[in-house]
């Protein structure tokens, strides 16, 4: 029940409405690397992330991955297919140990009928995801690796709510998200460190000059 209160998607619902959803939810636990659902699978419901973080990514026919986002509890994933009737549009896997609550499409639709404002809240979440995806496409299409890396590091810091955070992905996964290779990511991290923009200690990142990174992220090509 507490997880449902904390998820932004359900802000404004009454205790009775929250309890109605919570009663219908099925708790599931996933270990790091375990897949919650695969791209293309029929949508059976959506997932509330109550604990841990998940990675959302697409896979090409050749097996190449592009990471779209990292979502950390409390959050929700797989809202879009609740409405368009299509399959899951991306794969979601656990970054670390995850506790999720699954609500079926049928149960969610029933609650929406009782609370007409809920679909508007879902659309707001979907809109934010769409803007994020547009930024990714824009970055990969027009930005340099250095620019894209600066943007990604700032995003990770914002998600962590701190300028000191553990990198939530490997260098390989970060490279896939940025449309490059691991060696290029490592080289640019070293350059940022040499320029005093950040400090790297194993997987921990210290953002030392947020304004400098922001200038890098906004550099026009």
Image: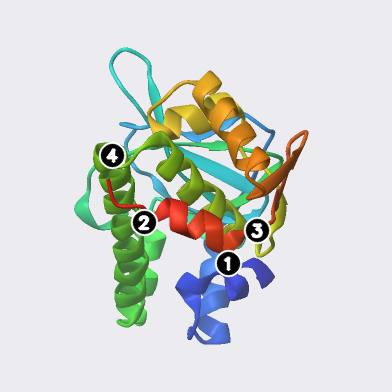
The residue that label 3 is drawn on is: 160
Q: Locate the C terminus and report the quarter of the image it occupies.
A: top left
User: What's the distance in space between the residues labelled 2 and 4, CA to CA?
Assistant: 11 Å
Question: First in sequence: mark 3 or mark 1?
Answer: 1
The residue that label 1 is drawn on is: 22
User: What's the distance in space between the residues labelled 3 and 4, CA to CA?
Assistant: 30 Å
| Residue at disc 4, secondary structure | loop
Question: First in sequence: mark 4 or mark 1?
Answer: 1
| Residue at disc 3, secondary structure | helix
* Label 3 Cα crowd, 10 Å radius (few <14 / some 14-19 / many 20+): some
The residue that label 2 is drawn on is: 79
Residue depicted at 36% across the width and 75% down the height: 121
Q: Decide: marks 2, 3 in contact (CB < 8 A)? A: no
Relative to 66, residue 157 above or below: below
Labels 2, 1: front one: 2
User: What's the distance in space between the residues labelled 2 and 3, CA to CA?
Assistant: 23 Å
Query: Can residue 129 be seen here?
Result: yes
| Res 87 label | 4
């Amino acid at each position: 029940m507490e997880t449902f209160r904390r998820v932004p998607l359900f802000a404004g619902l009454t205790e009775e409405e929250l309890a109605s959803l919570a009663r219908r939810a099925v708790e599931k636990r996933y270990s790091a690397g375990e897949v919650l659902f695969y791209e293309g699978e029929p949508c059976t419901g959506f997932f509330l992330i109550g604990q841990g973080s998940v990675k959302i990514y697409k896979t090409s026919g050749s097996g190449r991955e592009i990471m779209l986002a990292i979502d950390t509890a409390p959050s929700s994933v797989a809202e879009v297919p609740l409405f368009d009737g299509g399959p899951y549009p991306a794969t979601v896997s656990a970054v670390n140990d995850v506790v999720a609550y699954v609500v079926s499409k049928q149960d969610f639709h029933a609650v929406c009928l009782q609370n007409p404002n809920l679909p508007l809240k879902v659309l707001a979440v979907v809109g934010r995801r769409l803007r994020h995806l547009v930024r990714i496409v824009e970055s990969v299409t027009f930005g340099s690796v250095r620019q894209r890396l600066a943007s990604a590091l700032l995003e990770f810091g914002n998600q962590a709510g701190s300028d000191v955070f553990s990198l939530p992905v490997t260098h390989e996964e970060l490279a896939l998200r940025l449309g490059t290779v691991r060696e290029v990511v490592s080289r640019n991290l070293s350059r940022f460190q040499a320029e005093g923009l950040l400090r790297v200690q194993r997987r921990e990142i210290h953002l030392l000059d947020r304004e400098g990174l922001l200038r890098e992220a906004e550099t026009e090509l």
